Image: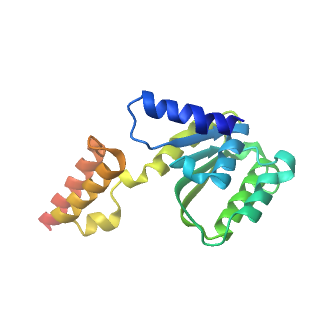
Amino acid sequence: MFLSFNKNELIPYIDKSCRINYIRILKGHSLGGLFAATILIEQPQLFSNYIIMSPALWWNGEELTRKAIANLMENQSIEKMVFFGIGKEESGADYGMRKELTNFIDVLNAKNINGLNIRHKEFEGEGHMSSPLRSNYFGLKHVFSDLKYSNAFISNFSIENFLEEENKIIAEYGDSAKRTGEAYYNLCSVIYKINLS
């Protein structure tokens, strides 16, 4: 029912009524994290990327993990950035929510899904209600990690490569998309040092 509302009413309304660039990130915590993980397994194309925080994967005896085993095909293609975050104080590593999350991620990794870029982070000193703040921060960094220049790009810098990278960002995020001023400054600093040597 909630999925149907999102798919058939909310998303079309936002698309029609708001200025958007059609990048949709689904974030969910606890039961909302279970919902986000369910969409990732059942209808991954509905959202561009996923930030899944402390998901309640224990629900119904880890039913979603069993569904993932049954429904995901080997080497299928799901081009998504997915971040999973959880607090280390939510359970021990060998039982409870941390273990259930590890079980779910192990299934995704075992299926060798093409294009699925997963990052999993456990936060020291954080519990179920405090970990979402850090999960949100690191999740957004993961989802938008293409806005950071890679070491390979910097070491092989050329004007042609630079323009190609900028055009990729514009194609992905829109005409007004730019990296941070810090990213450009750091790139200029490295190039300046290389030219001095």
Quarter holding the N terminus is top right
Residue at x 22% of width, y 59% of height: 162
Q: In this rendering, does residue 54 appear at all?
A: no
Q: Is residue 19 visible?
A: yes
Q: Indicate the quadrant containing the C terminus: top left, top right, bottom left or bottom right.
A: bottom left
How many marks on residues?
A: 0
| Residue under the image location 43 percent in, 49 percent down | 144
Q: Residue furthest right?
A: 61
Q: In this view, does 183 lie to the left or right of 124?
A: left
Question: Which residue occupies 21% across, 54% down?
Answer: 189
18 sits left or right of 81 in the view: left
The picture places residue 27, in percent across and down from the top left corner, at 59, 40
Front residue of 27/41: it is: 41
Q: Give x and y (percent) for residue 89.
A: 73, 43
When asked about the image quadrant of residue 51, the answer is top right
Q: Where is residue 159 in the image (x, y as percent from the top left)?
A: 16, 62
For residue 136, above or below residue 156: above
Q: Give residue 154's position: percent from left, percent from top.
A: 27, 63
